Structure formats: C-alpha cells, structure tokens
Image: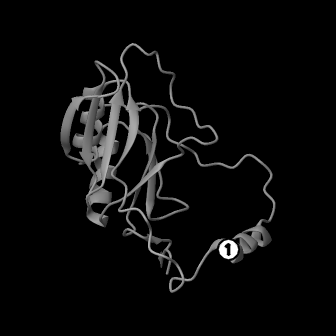
Amino acid sequence: MRAGPTAPTLEVTATMTDRTAEWDRIRDAHLRSRELRPASTARGVHHLALLCSDVEQTIRFYQDVLGFPLIELFENRDYEGSTHFFFDIGHGNLLAFFDFPGLGLEPYREVLGGFHHLAISVSPEQFDAAKERLGAAGVDVVGPEHVEESIYFMDPDGTRLELLRAPLHEMEGRLLGA
C-alpha cells in the first residue's frame, strides 16, 4: 500500500521574525492560570470528519496499518450514496470519514482556515510498531528527527498525520495547561 503524496518536509520558507513579544502579550491577555481557568463547556471531540476517495483503501490504511479499529459504517444522512464510517482512536475519540462519490472533489490542499494535521498519541510500543507497518506499506515517513517523539506522514488522500509517543496533554516533556 502506498499512501498519498510524499511525506511533509516541515520546512519554513518565509523569513521569520522574532515573535516573542507578541506571544508574551497574547499570553498575558488571554491565558488564565489553572486556578482561574473555567472548566470547558465541551465534553470532548465526538469525532473529526475527513474526506476520502476510496472507502476500502481508507479502512485498510487506518485499521490495518495504523491499528485503529473500524467501529461503524453506514450511509451519510446528508448525501445519498455517501459512506460515513468511524475508527476508534482511543479514550472515546473517533475519527470519521465520508466519501462523496460523484462530486469530483479536488486533492487535499493546505489553506487558511483549513486542516493542517491530526496528531494522535500512541504508546512507545505502538509508535515503533506503527512506524514499522508504515514502512512495510511503503508510506513515506518523516521523523523522528527534530522532534524525537513524533513521526509525520500522509494518508492515501494526502491528509497529514502525526503519531506522538507523548501522553495525552503532554508536549515536549511538559504538561499542557498546567
């Protein structure tokens, strides 16, 4: 199985300026300490819905290569003939897909307001196993290099994915929101 386009290079081509003062200002204006931060009004992400060109190819990739069990498949209620299907990505989180036959959708493009990548936490053992399965399937993988805890790759339709060895709510060795 060969997945989508070449893996992302994560290169920055624009000239970057030091934004430290801007980030400090934003933190001061909007980031509340844990003690002052209200509880979220949400219960969690029910599912993230992505688009695919081929239902079975997508199932083989997400279930067989990444190890996310397919848990449901039915007709999309909003588009006759479209499939809506779900994968379990742990802790009650679901990843869903639609196919939209006959719509002539264009390949994935990164645009403002659009989707950049999906980062999924896996155990160190699952991380290593997934990296092996991706390689065996011929999927181009970037990392771990600059970020030792992550690998980046594309699914068959070009959706950028990241697998992290880091536990949920942790990034670069620190607890987020602490």
Residue lying at the far top in this picture: please name it. Answer: 102
Q: Toward which corner of the image does residue 138 lie, by quadrant?
A: top left
The residue drawn where x is 29% and y is 65% is 123
Q: Give the number of callouts.
A: 1
Give percent across and percent down for residue 133.
28, 46
Residue drawn at point x = 37 percent, y = 65 percent? 165
> Compared to 27, does 139 lie above or below?
above
Residue at the spot 69% in from the left edge and 49% down from the top edge = 12
Q: Position of residue 36 (x, y in %)?
A: 54, 83
Could you tell me the amino acid type at mark 1? Answer: Arg
- In this rendering, the answer to whether 90 lies above or below 25 is above
Judging from the image, what secondary structure is the residue with disc 1 in? helix
Residue 99, above or below 39: above
Question: Alpha-carbon neighbours of circle 1 within 10 Å: few (<14), some, or many (≥20)?
Answer: few
Figure coloring = one colour
Report which residue position mark 1 lands on: 27
Comparing 62 with 103, the one in front is 103
Camera-side residue of 159 and 87: 87
| Place of residue 31 in the rendered image (x, y in percent of width and height, measured from the top left) | 62, 75
Residue depicted at x 25% and y 35%: 59
The quadrant in which residue 155 appears is: top left
